Image (tube, helix red, strand yellow):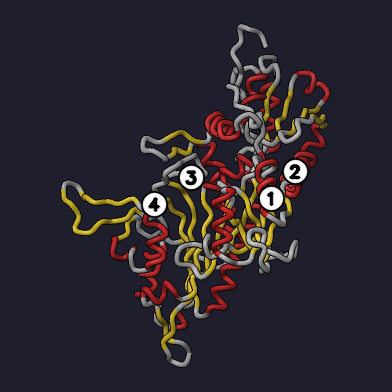
């Protein structure tokens, strides 16, 4: 590039040098978010929101396919209502934002800005569930919530974020258990099939479960830097909330019973996973299935007669097959190449005078940078197949990285050495004692990520205390 020309795209820090700064650079340079005026808030810009909308639309479809209805509950929760379930309020108390005034008047009772909506749904269910005929209640809402985080980072941990939260009520514990399993499966399918991120599925320890839950199921993914990210959770509440809020129904024998509830959610945090699993030192890499633009046409020498006209014809030819756009701005092709690499658009389609003569285009993959010359008559068939190849390659690459970064440890020396030298997931046996779980966190900063459904016996003794082991746990440092 000549000295007179400015850099086409601002540099981003190499992830090998400073992963945290790399993440921040990508988020900003790819125009995903800007910072809000209040600490920890973010403005999700058009491109970032377009990605989120595609994730949201796909998940919303899956939620509705499983029989759930969308609803909208209030943003505000009276303090007295929030305090009705002791474990729940204790778990969220440090993160709650409070409203103390309405206009110029001090409120008689503080109002919480929703950190989550369990108590609102419980209050509603207590007034609207009377008979077994009213069950199950299968509700979901798309909402924003506020949690006053001490340390914030766009998408990963923000004071306000967007998500969906499902809240269901069932006649039996077994029905609620099936719902909890089913919705975790929905999340796993979404994240693996559409975001191309492999996950471990399992149950949280009692220490890590949702406040007030009987148990919590989770999907855990691995970031490029070897840290884990909780990517979606599904909670079985049992009848604990129902007992606190007196949510009862008359069964078929006319006897009063408590309902059994679940809650489950996936948030804009998954956008952070998308960035950190697939991104590279050129910016984002977006899996085709959730990319707002799957292919970007970049005309070459567009000032020459017929080039732009042919490019627009090509766009119209492809728009019913893939999500395609064209950059007909007067910026230089090199600038455009860098711009769409930064934004992670899966395929770039180059077309110049020589290509028009040969009735071909050049397809450039974002994931590998490979170029492919395709005749115009073959393009409608080739392009969708190429997008699927990219989708699969991104998943395979992420899976290979996770497998490489998953290590067995049978004692604390191995555990600490792996964390210091390699990171990633550590498979280690656990005795089930909370004291060991807390000691591991205190000594290594690693936390239990999940007790996987697919259990293995990698040792007979607990990695921490050496006593008889009860189950295998995945451990990792995490976001």
Nearer the viewer's eye, disc 3 or disc 2?
3
Residue 271 or residue 60, whichever sits in front: 271
Residue corresponding to mark 4 = 95
Per the model, the C-alpha gap separating discs 4 and 1 is 36 Å
Per the model, the C-alpha gap separating discs 4 and 3 is 12 Å
Q: Where, by quadrant of the figure, is residue 50 drawn? A: top right
In the image, 228: left or right of 383?
left
Residue 25 or residue 443, whichever sits in front: 443
Residue 207 or residue 442, whichever sits in front: 442
Q: Where, by quadrant of the figure, is residue 6 drawn? A: top right
CB atoms at circles 4 and 1 under 8 Å apart? Answer: no
Q: Earlier in the sequence, mark 4 or mark 3?
A: 4
Helix, strand or loop at label 1? It is helix
Residue corresponding to mark 2 = 397
In the image, 207: left or right of 397?
left
Q: Residue at x 64, y 34 (%)?
A: 344
Q: Earlier in the sequence, mark 2 or mark 1?
A: 2
Q: Residue at x 61, y 43 (%)?
A: 274
Q: Could you say which disc has been placed on residue 157 in the image?
A: 3
Residue corresponding to mark 1 = 413
Helix, strand or loop at label 3? It is loop
Circle 1 Cα neighbour tier, 10 Å, few/some/many (<14 / 14–19 / ≥20): few
Per the model, the C-alpha gap separating discs 3 and 2 is 26 Å
């Amino acid at each position: 590039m000549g000295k007179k020309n400015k850099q086409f795209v601002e540099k981003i820090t190499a992830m090998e040098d400073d992963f945290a700064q790399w993440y921040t650079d990508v988020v900003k340079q790819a125009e995903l978010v800007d910072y809000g005026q209040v600490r920890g808030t973010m403005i999700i810009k058009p491109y970032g929101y377009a990605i989120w909308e595609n994730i949201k639309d796909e998940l919303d479809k899956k939620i509705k396919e499983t029989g759930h209805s969308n609803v909208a509950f209030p943003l505000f929760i009276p303090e007295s209502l929030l305090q009705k379930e002791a474990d729940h309020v204790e778990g969220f108390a440090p993160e709650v934002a409070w409203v103390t005034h309405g206009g110029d008047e001090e409120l008689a009772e503080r109002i919480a800005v929703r950190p989550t909506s369990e108590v609102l749904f419980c209050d509603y269910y207590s007034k609207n569930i009377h008979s077994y005929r009213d069950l199950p209640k299968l509700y979901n809402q798309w909402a924003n919530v506020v949690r006053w985080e001490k340390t914030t980072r766009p998408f990963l941990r923000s004071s306000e974020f967007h998500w969906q939260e499902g809240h269901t009520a069932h006649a039996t514990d077994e029905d609620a258990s099936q719902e909890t399993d089913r919705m975790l499966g929905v999340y796993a399918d979404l994240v693996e099939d559409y975001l191309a991120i492999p996950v471990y599925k399992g149950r949280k320890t009692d220490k890590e479960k949702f406040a007030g839950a009987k148990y919590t199921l989770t999907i855990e993914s691995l970031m490029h830097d070897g840290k884990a990210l909780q990517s979606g959770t599904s909670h079985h509440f049992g009848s604990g909330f129902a007992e606190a809020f007196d949510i009862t129904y008359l069964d078929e024998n006319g006897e009063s019973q408590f309902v059994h509830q679940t809650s489950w959610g996936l948030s804009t945090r998954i956008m952070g996973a998308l960035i950190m699993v697939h991104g590279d030192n050129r910016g984002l890499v977006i899996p085709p299935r959730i990319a707002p633009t799957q292919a970007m046409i970049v005309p070459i020498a567009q000032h020459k007669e017929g080039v732009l006209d042919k490019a627009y014809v090509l766009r119209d030819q492809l728009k019913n097959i893939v999500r395609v756009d064209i950059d007909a701005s007067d910026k230089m092709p090199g600038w455009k190449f860098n711009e769409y690499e930064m934004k992670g658009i899966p395929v770039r389609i180059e077309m110049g005078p020589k290509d028009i003569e040969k009735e071909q285009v050049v397809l450039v993959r974002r994931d590998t940078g490979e170029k492919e010359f395709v005749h115009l008559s073959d393009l409608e068939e080739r392009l969708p197949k190429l997008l699927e190849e990219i989708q699969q390659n991104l998943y395979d690459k992420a899976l290979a990285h996770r497998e490489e970064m998953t290590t067995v440890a049978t004692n604390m020396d191995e555990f600490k050495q792996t964390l210091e030298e390699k990171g990633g997931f550590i498979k280690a046996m656990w005795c089930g004692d909370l004291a060991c779980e807390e000691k591991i966190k205190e000594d290594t900063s690693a936390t239990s990520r999940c007790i996987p459904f697919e259990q293995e016996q990698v040792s007979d003794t607990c990695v921490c205390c050496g006593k008889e082991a009860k189950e295998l746990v995945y451990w990792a440092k995490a976001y």
